[in-house]
Amino acid sequence: MITPHIPGFTGYPLDRVDPLRTDAAALSSLAADPKARVLRLPDLHPEVDDAGALVWDALGEAHLDQPLILLGLADGVGHFALLAPTKAGAPLYRAPRLMTLLASLSTEQAALYGTARALIDWHGRHGFCGRCGAETQVIRGGWGRHCCGCTLDHFPRVDPVVIMLAEHGGRVLLGRQATWPVGRYSALAGFLEPGESVEEAVARELYEEAGVRACAVRYVTSQPWPFPAQLMLACVAEVESDTLTLSPAEIEDAFWASRDEVRAALAGAEDARFGAPPLYAVAFTLLKHWAEG
Amino acid sequence: MITPHIPGFTGYPLDRVDPLRTDAAALSSLAADPKARVLRLPDLHPEVDDAGALVWDALGEAHLDQPLILLGLADGVGHFALLAPTKAGAPLYRAPRLMTLLASLSTEQAALYGTARALIDWHGRHGFCGRCGAETQVIRGGWGRHCCGCTLDHFPRVDPVVIMLAEHGGRVLLGRQATWPVGRYSALAGFLEPGESVEEAVARELYEEAGVRACAVRYVTSQPWPFPAQLMLACVAEVESDTLTLSPAEIEDAFWASRDEVRAALAGAEDARFGAPPLYAVAFTLLKHWAEG
């Protein structure tokens, strides 16, 4: 069983070697090493072997003329992702097959996949400079883009998202969106805006979505979420009242769950009141933390 | 005295009214209200009155044909910022006059200024679509841009940054960059990357910059930092050893400070071993938290 307190997509197993990213000679040498590996990512999906590990290919000379992302080193060997052009249209962030594959990966293997995918996705959305409109080109071993017009450097974007359990009278608030699998409920969540602290964003989202006022917010844990590149900041917020005013645009239904109800759902009990979020979602970690606390 | 446990730039005093941002009729009505206000921002600097409050002007008809950012409502009255084109070149994020003005603002007034500034700055860097290079136009009352080419919507960027005190044997690690005011030392910090949790980014940065290995990371607090739009995530990290290997590219000098030394610096004592970060920086809050804990 996956240890539930370790959030999914954490435990990146490579050394990120930031200083090497700007060292052209070192990058060339790593890519030319016959041991160099490139992550197999058909249609941006992971390919998983029988042992639950991601599949790598030899980098080989065929790829040396294509832009590469240096994911990092393992035992001194460069591990790369190919910056292949992605298909037109939005990537399928929540394809059922992808979710099944993710459930078969350890957190460390998911961290590798997630990082590669987040970076490839970012490159696909930053081929032009937002400031001047000119084309950009890959720099820093795949960890940036340089504008050929105004010379501005661009760095991979990470969007902070707050995800939180409102708590009142020994119960926590769970909600669901209309697009989710039948019966699934989870913590509420939303993007943090410019000018907000984590604690302020938690309070605003709870009020906007459920009409409850937070009086104390405590941080629990965090997780990178690669669809496309969020930083999930998981919190518990004590609220003043359990009277709900739901925002129908965001929440289809919500209810207050007891510790026993949460424990039953996390254990996958047949008679559980709701379906829990998947193990690899930080909402699972957050619920587990609360249910045990 | 400003309460040191409230991080600077927090306590935004307006209602952000997210649902109104997509309501064109409501936005027009708010802007046409004779009570509507627009923040005075000469050269992106705040203008501060004798009571330490930001100065607002009547919005007036003169501005109705210019793009506006709806900062929010106070008593039902719309408060706006003008999306005026900024001067060419990088804004002066750390101009001495700006730092002096910031020190004179309450956290709530600084939160208002910071939010307006972060948004204006973001618009200036996103006039073109990163995906297709076409021009973008303002949407959502200033809280987004829409691509006129590929129709992608863009939302204001917030970059998560970890800032942390390494702790060992009852002392914490403080460092300085060569560009800082003489004698100033503070917590180490760095941008979080795709594929990292907060805790992983803290551990990576401490190892990269100072050669120390984190064995436990605890979150303390957070702060929006508007130069241009960071989310500062402040932590304390227990580390395995106090032996330092500094990265000369990032850290000019570093030392381990005792609680008494930190207290003296925060109090501004003449014989303090180092100069503390300013009150409005979350590093001040973090140091105060540690010194009192």
Image (cartoon, coloured by chain):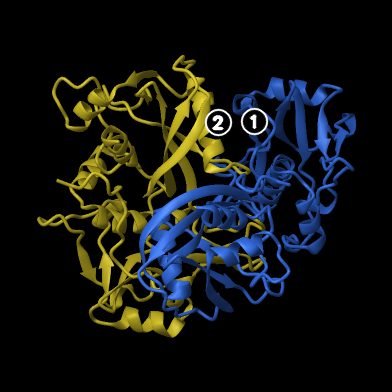
Chain colours: A blue, B yellow
Q: Residue at x 41, y 58 (%)?
A: B119
Q: Residue at x 55, y 31 (%)?
A: B204
Instruction: Provide the chain ID for the residue under circle 2.
Output: B
Q: Position of residue B259 (x, y in %)?
A: 27, 26
Q: Decide if residue A186 is on the left or right side of residue B62.
A: right
> Residue A49, relative to residue B148: is it above or below?
above
Q: Which residue type does callout 1 highlight? A: Arg
Is there a contact, CB below 8 Å, between mark 2 and mark 1?
yes
> Residue A211, relative to residue B207: is it above or below?
below
Q: Position of residue A213 (x, y in %)?
A: 37, 69
**What crowding class fits label 1: few (fewer than 14 Cα within 10 Å), some (14-19), or many (20 or more)?**
some
Q: Position of residue A91 (x, y in %)?
A: 74, 60
Residue tagged by mark 2? B204
Q: Quadrant of residue B96?
A: top left
> Residue B146, relative to residue B19: is it above or below?
above
Q: Position of residue A144 (x, y in %)?
A: 62, 39
- Which numbered circle lies on residue B270? none
Mark 2 falls on what kind of element?
helix
Q: Decide if residue A217 is on the left or right side of residue A131.
A: left
Q: Quadrant of residue A52?
A: top right
Mark whose residue sits in front, 2 or 1: 2
Using the image as rendered, state which of residue A54 and residue A87 is in the foreground.
A54
Instruction: Provide the chain ID for the residue under circle 1.
Output: A
Residue tagged by mark 1? A16
Q: Decide if residue B23 is on the left or right side of residue A175.
A: left
Q: Which residue type does callout 2 highlight? A: Arg
Q: Quadrant of residue B42?
A: bottom left
Using the image as rendered, state which of residue A291 and residue B74 is in the foreground.
A291
> Residue A260, relative to residue B201: is it above or below?
below
